[in-house]
Image (cartoon, rainbow, N blue to C red):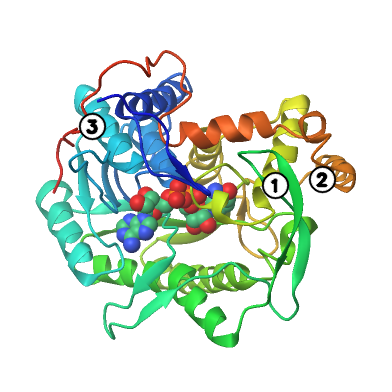
Amino acid sequence: MIIKPKTRGFICTTAHPTGCAAQVNRQVEYVKNRPAISGPKNVLVIGASTGYGLASRIVAAFGAGANTIGVYGHKPAQGSRTASPGWYNSAAFERAALEAGLKSYSVTGDAFSDETKQKTIDVIRAEFGKVDTIVYSLASPRRIHPKTGEVFNSVIKPIGEPYTNKTVNFHTGVVSEATIEPATEEEIRQTVAVMGGEDWQMWIEALQEAGVLADNATTVAYSYIGPKITHAVYWDGTIGRAKNDLEQTAERLNKQLGATGGRAYVTVCKALVTQSSAAIPVVPLYISVLYKIMKEEGVHEGCIEQMYRLFAEYLYSGEPVRLDDEGRIRIDDLEMQPHIQEAVLKAWDELTTENIDELSDLVSYRKEFFQLFGFETEGVDYDADVDPNVDIPNLR
Ligand SMILES: NC(=O)c1ccc[n+]([C@@H]2O[C@H](COP(=O)([O-])OP(=O)(O)OC[C@H]3O[C@@H](n4cnc5c(N)ncnc54)[C@H](O)[C@@H]3O)[C@@H](O)[C@H]2O)c1
């Protein structure tokens, strides 16, 4: 069938298998052309099919030659519906790993459930023995608690007061003001339950109890802090509370794993176009401005560049890991440079619908958004007939 993008707000309901594969292969090529990384051997990535998780898996496999297990939510094609981009990405990843002679497995299911954890443990035990690196990269709107069955929904809201700022409809380029009402205590609690550290801890403990966690294991989870412009809706809001909880979890895990030479880190990453960040008001406009300035300065990075730097220069550099005062890894360092942020702020104050293309890189934002779903990718013939049914090798 001929597959074209179909959007509904900040989501695209179709995905293109050839385009997604091309995006994955571009990231694989980037990593293959960088110096090899030495350290990780058997890597588990939770949330491995898109964004930072997918890039982490590509770096582990093609940068360090590691065997990998990717855990992610699954949506194969059905009738006239295409599969999700994560499905096509993972199919392309598994094919590339097979070709490179790397062991790799995909476990699909709800990562928050005991069942998926057990399924993953079974694969580790049968195929790898143990894992030495665990990347926790879930971004989810909802979690069912595996012990109590309680359903939690995460919200992106400020705390205390309503928040008003500029935002953009990235499809039309219209800049307007968005006001978000503050979260209730219950909404804060539920957001922390979804995006905080409890499930990360549950994963590590399940792996430890099953005896499939290597002694000197490294685990990492991702966070974002960002500039003052987004603080009210992000760092000082509901999601920031969850990220705070993630940091406390890292501290606890560090102590727990430290006894056997292991380590746990929260890594603060750069703001990038992913399915998750597209859903946050204000953030797409901030990213568009940031992209323009960072590109002009020659310091722009995407997911793959960020993850390569994390593995090569921090986690597996052979040196003690550089941390900030709060014990976090900061690969948002380039984004947060004062002169970059000053330039963003200056543009931000002046931004209107009329000058958006001059002051921001909305064109790239839009393009990258569609690329997340395999569209607008060079070298892909979008008028060609393509089979939406794609098998994932090594799917468990
Ligand atoms: N995008 C950014 O700008 C940015 C910046 C800094 C930090 N981060 C953080 O990085 C992490 C990953 O975010 P992303 O932007 O790469 O998101 P993403 O939406 O691209 O990826 C999320 C992954 O989680 C998986 N997932 C979600 N719910 C699941 C479930 N219940 N069971 C199994 N798999 C599930 C998806 O399949 C996907 O593989 C998050 O913690 C996010 O806060 C993102």
Residue 176 lies, in percent from the top left, at 76, 52
Quarter of the rendering occupied by the N terminus: top left
Q: Residues within 10 Å of mark 1 (few under 14, many from 20)?
A: many
Residue situated in front as seen by the camera: 177 or 16: 177
> Mark 3, residues whose alpha carbon is within 10 Å: few (<14), some, or many (≥20)?
many
Tell which tag, 3 or 2, sits nearer the viewer.
3
Q: Is residue 219 left or right of residue 113?
A: right
Instruction: Tell me the mark number nearer the camera, choosing from 1 and 2.
Output: 1
Quadrant hosting residue 115:
bottom left
User: What element does badge 2 sit on?
Assistant: helix
Give the residue at mark 3.
388
Tell me what residue is drawn at x 75 percent, y 39 percent.
289
Amino acid at dot 3: Pro
Identify the amino acid type marked 2.
Gln
Q: Who comes first in sequence, dot 1 or dot 2?
A: 1
The residue pinned by badge 1 equals 168
Please indicate, yes or no, whether residue 280 appears anywhere in the rendered image: yes
Q: At label 1, which amino acid type do we have?
A: Val
Residue 149 drawn above or below residue 293: below
How packed mark 2 is, by other alpha carbons closer than 10 Å (few <14, some 14-19, many 20 or more), is many
Q: Secondary structure at mark 1?
A: strand
Q: Residue at x 68, y 65 (%)?
A: 233
Query: What whole-number distance in Å separates the C-alpha atoms at marks 1 and 2?
Result: 19 Å
Locate residue 40, reporting x and y percent: 35, 42
Residue that numbered label 2 is attached to: 341
Left or right side of 138 for 43: left
Q: Residue at x 48, y 41 (%)?
A: 311
